[in-house]
Amino acid sequence: MIKPFLVLQLRPEDDVADNELAAILRFGNLNPSNVHRVRTEKEGIPDVSLDGYSGVIIGGAPYNVSDHNKKPDQRKIESRLYSLMDKIMAKDFPFLGECYGLGILASYLGGSVSKEQYGEGVGAVTVSLSNEASDDPLLAGLPKKFRAFVGHKEACQHVPPQATHLASSKSCLVQMIKVKENIYATQFHPTLDSHALAIRVNAYKHVGYFPPEDAEKLIALAHKETITVPELILGRFVERYSQPKRLTN
């Protein structure tokens, strides 16, 4: 039996959080016994020993790392996340951050995360892999260009220190990075198909990602997309790092 993956969720909406977890289970070929799910907005972030896990997965969030007037709960969560990143970096421990997870990793590394440029509206974009991605275990053999769902107000303004740049899009410089050998983060969403995007559009249509009256149009456009590659990246991450099969470096 593999050690579980620690899945940290930061979404207060039950339907969105449940859908995100279901995608991690489905695309990762996991069952509930293979994950330790933590709803951070309800439970906080536990002080864990990474030795008990195969890897750490952080999903998206309604937060922005670059927010100036942060509520106390966001400040507390981010403080605990940075403490967890200390452990992850020290061990080069398998980590996959999605959207907000990229912001946390980039900020931790001393990168610039802001709303200055590179934000992307809700919908699909074409992601292009860099030359450095050609021999990466999660990306080798995948199409050099693929469609992925995005939706974010803030973004990395440059490739963070210590990071390898793995992917970009025309509208966003940093779509995927890698740190050391086992620490990854994506700006796009490996957990999103068109059904999941529809759930999030309805959940967040009044928080400034898009005009509320555009919700149905965005959902219709999403259903016209064929999004297949991002989920493969999530699946490869789980396959590569599932202990006791985890590769050593």
Image: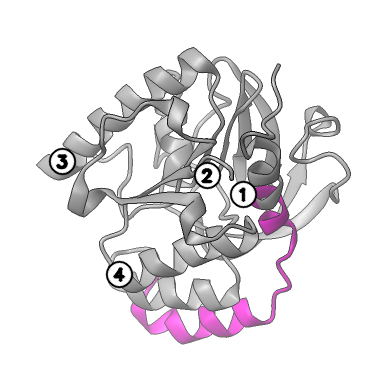
Circle 4 sits on which residue? 14
Give the crowd class for mark 4: few <14, some 14-19, many >=20 residues within 10 Å. few
Which stretch is magenta?
Answer: 210-234
Q: Residue at x 64, y 60 (%)?
A: 27
Q: Earlier in the sequence, mark 1 or mark 2?
A: 2
Helix, strand or loop status at disc 4: helix
Of the two numbered discs 4 and 3 on the same chain, state the one appearing first in sequence.
Answer: 4
Question: Distance from label 4 to label 3 (Cα)?
Answer: 25 Å
Along the polypeptide, which appears first: circle 4 or circle 1?
4
- Can you tell which of label 1 and label 3 is closer to the viewer? 3
Q: Position of residue 3 (x, y in %)?
A: 52, 40
Q: Amino acid at mark 3?
A: Asn
Q: Earlier in the sequence, mark 1 or mark 3?
A: 3
Mark on residue 171? 1
> Is residue 96 covered in magenta?
no
| Distance between the alpha carbons at the discs numbered 1 and 2 | 6 Å
* Badge 1 amino acid: Ser
> Dot 2: within a 10 Å radius of its alpha carbon, few (fewer than 14), some, or many (20 or more) residues?
many
**75 sits to left or right of 103:** left
Vertical order, 42 against 124 (above or below): above
Nearer to us: label 4 or label 3:
4
Residue under the image location 32 percent in, 37 percent down? 66
| Quarter assignment of residue 161 | top right
Q: Position of residue 206 (x, y in %)?
A: 28, 72
Residue annotated with mark 3: 69
Is mark 1 in CB contact (under 8 Å) with mark 2?
yes
Please name the amino acid that badge 2 sits on. Answer: Tyr
Kindly state the secondary structure of the residue where label 3 is placed: loop
Does residue 153 lie above or below 211 as drawn? above
- Compute the Cα span from label 4 to label 1: 31 Å
Is 216 one of the magenta-colored residues? Answer: yes
